[in-house]
Amino acid sequence: MSRHFTQLDKSLTQAERTMLVAVMLADALSGSNAVREHTFRAMTDEAAELVRAAGGDLVCTETAKRDRAHTALFVGTGKAEELAQRVAAEQIELVVFNHELTPTQERNLEKILQCRVLDRVGLILAIFAQRAQSQEGKIQVELAQLSHLAGRLVRGYGHLQSQKGGIGLKGPGETQLETDRRLIHKRINALRRRLAEVKKQRAVRRKARVSGSLKTFALVGYTNAGKSTLFNRLTKAGVFAENQLFATLDPTARRLYLNPECSVVVSDTVGFVRDLPHTLVSAFAATLEETALADGLLHIVDASHPEHERQIADVEKVLAEIGADKVPQLLVYNKTDLLPEAQRRNGICRNGRGEIVAVRLSAQSGAGLDALREALAERA
């Protein structure tokens, strides 16, 4: 089996000069023109953060509007030629589309642009490949990469063969011309068997927690909402937390003492994002199962983000995909320290029946953490 199947290379040789392409499709966004424009700008800004998170040097951003995606090129012939001229002028090495491309569209674009093309799915997978630390995380990422790569094997372009590294060229993507479908599917089956073993191990650990009568709460939320920072504040776990998208991937569980009569288990999980690739959701099924089987979910929301309502909806969509939409939720509005002075309210929010529906806090400053502990004790 080819050497690029043996492990995931997380290093970048250098920051690639990258162009981001975002297309506003008329049939993809709803609402008034102003709302659609605002949503599109927010999506483009998030894509730019994803490029930077992957280690790319974002040189320029190109936008366009279309009624629907062009079958062969996604952007259309005229726009593709315009992009090719910009690629040559700016010495662009990688073009990232903030959309999911078909294998045919990807190949056609690479012919015209004469550089590598990566779609949104490939970009997110590249970030996950760089960030996975545990053996389980690496297995899940490699499985997702190989599933994505399976339809993108035929690349007859000499300019791609000389690539030594870069965003998306990790592990299975490094020497695609040498890759054989039979070997890929053989590797995929082997990875699925190993993940099945991981699932059994998780079931054993979960059974031990249940026998100890400890309620389990999983932290979920949009990526960069502050889950890991809050997790560290609560449990002193010391997991990696950074102000960037997908800073942590590997789930961590810790026991949290609330009061002499009550302790719970809190688990940190991978963050979600708009249009999270289905291959990734499938590959991380063993990890995400912890979320679906938790006694409760702490849905962490970045209260300071202008699009936080949309982010809540995106998380709810992924929770439904993994069968966790029926698990009781507690909204935790984080980063209140970044709000205007008049809006910095921390503490428990109750409905008309006196039930806790949300908690407002700042994991960074620690304001409101006691209120969250109180809410957890009441829920537990």
Image: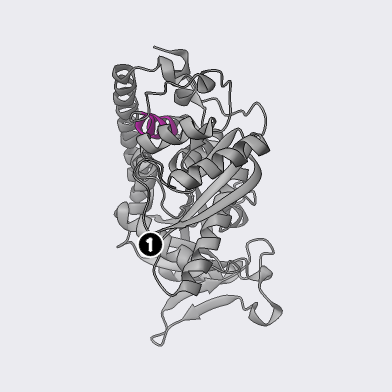
Q: Judge left or right: residue 374 versus residue 341.
A: left
162 or 75, which lies in front?
75
Kindly identify the residue that appears in the image at 64 percent across and 80 percent down. Answer: 343
User: Does the magenta portion include 157?
Assistant: no
Instruction: Give residue 280's position: percent from left, percent from top.
Output: 39, 41
* Residue 193 visible in the picture: yes
Residue position for label 1: 316
Which residue is more in the foreground, 117 or 42? Answer: 117
Question: Given the current orientation, which residue lies at the most extreme front position?
Answer: 78
**Magenta segment:** 140-149
Please give the name of the residue rendered at 38% of the width and 52% of the height, measured from the top-left corner. 291
Residue 133: tell me if it is visible. Answer: no
- Residue at figure coordinates x 42%, y 60% from the top left: 314
Picture quarter containing residue 296? bottom left
Number of disc labels: 1
* Quadrant containing the C terminus in the rendered view: bottom left
Which part of the image, by quadrant, shows the N terminus? top left
Image x and y of residue 237, in percent: 59, 47
- Against 186, residue 344 (above or below) is below
Q: In the displayed structure, would residue 324 be above or below residue 277?
A: below
